[in-house]
Amino acid sequence: MNSTTDLETIAPLFKPFRLGSLDLANRVVMAPMTRLHSPNGIPGEDVAAYYRRRAEGGVSLIITEGTYIDHKAANGYDNAPAFYGEKALAGWKKVVEEVHAAGGKIIPQIWHVGSVRRAGLQPDPAVPGQGPSEIREDDHVVVQQMSIDDIKEVIASYVRAALDTQKLGFDGIEIHAAHGYLIDQFYWEGSNHRQDAYGGSLEKRSRLGLEIVTAIRAAVGPDFPIVYRFSQWKGQDYNARIAQSPEELARILQPLAQAGVDVFHASTRRFWEPAFEGSEDNLATWARKLTGKPVVTVGSVSLDKQFSSGIFSGTEDPKAATTDLKELNRRLARDDFDLVAVGRALLSDPQWANKMKAGQLDLITPFDKEALQSLT
């Protein structure tokens, strides 16, 4: 890929974009990818260097891996990074400084795993999971149904994280409301069996996410960018759907837009797949049409083989080659979406964006699942 025609084909990916108060050099976003390289919840120098390399590699906006809030049941994985406490926040401050020094922008993905958690994990091994509904295994309660007071505590925890995001100098915040974690568990009928103000109708199941956005917007003020990541699929069910139609999706997203979401990050496994029958539009495009807000698309960008989407992604065939991005840029050029999140392709090659811009596809290191084992 060295001809002028090919470079013109990918040109939409490298047009500047203004996101609120942020000027982005191009449309390439680093997707949030859990790495589990933060012992005791503390991101170290290796984590800071890892993110800096992506900024040096031409990514205009980095979204960090999921980082859990200070609620007692927020964490679900060993060595996931925390977003509270003096040492963890100092680690994140170093990350921000390194990315900014390399000319990049960065926002943290704020996370609560909900019912994914089990007792035995940090920070307090005695605390079981909490979620919208109780879960029993072998007649033992392994996930407690959250009370109204528990819900209020979680919202307050999100607000504290948002304020710390500002204090540390991040360029915005992403709320993780996808993939079967806490907020998404409330959306999905498969996990939310409540009969109170947070369960039953779609509006009631949407209430937690809406209250978190409303509280964060009130705390951070009108100009701090809020990104909201949502999905249809769950880690335990790729066919799950929180919205069966564009009309139902509008009932979820439009109140969030009015409450203060600036950007919707629509997580799909393959960006080219339609969200609903009768239209080729993907989930991000529908979010843009329904809310008028900028959107991020994501899903197997620059991969040509199917990979699982869990934390430890991989298949029997561990390698994927870079792909022709004509379809991605065709949709980007006609304003189907505004930004493009690149995930696994950036794990093996921090210089992916720079090489892509230069038309040097033959020099890009293809994704290999071995890249998951270290911070390349």
Image: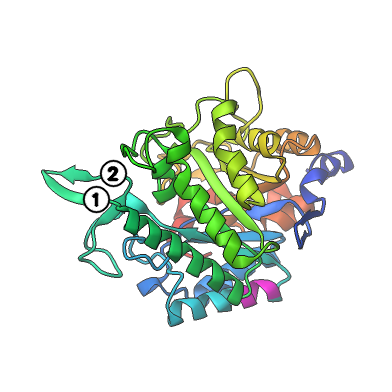
Residue 371 in magenta stretch: no
Residue 143: give its label. Answer: 1
| Callout 1 amino acid | Val
Q: How is the image coloured?
A: rainbow
> Viewer-nearest of labels 1 and 2?
2
Q: Quadrant of residue 254?
A: top right
| Callout 2 amino acid | Ser
Q: Which residues are magenta?
A: 96-100
Tell me the residue at 72%/40% (across/down).
292
Q: Outermost residue toward the left? A: 139
Relative depth, front residue between 59 and 133:
133
Q: Residues within 10 Å of mark 1 (few under 14, many from 20)?
A: many
Relative depth, front residue between 279 and 370:
279
Q: Outermost residue toward the front? A: 197
* Spatial CA span between label 1 and label 2: 8 Å
Image position, residue 148 (x, y; %): 34, 53
Judged left or right of residue 233, residue 125 is: left
Residue 250 drawn above or below residue 40: above
Tell me the residue at 68%/65% (across/down).
105
Image position, residue 190 (x, y; %): 35, 34
Residue 99 in magenta stretch: yes
Check the picture and name the quadrant holding the N terminus: top right
Q: Quadrant of residue 314?
A: top left
The residue that label 2 is drawn on is 133
Asked whether residue 166 appears in the rendered view, the answer is yes
Relative depth, front residue between 79 and 254:
254
Image position, residue 360 (x, y; %): 75, 50
Tell me the residue at 61%/50% (across/down).
259
In terms of secondary structure, where does tag 1 sit?
A: strand
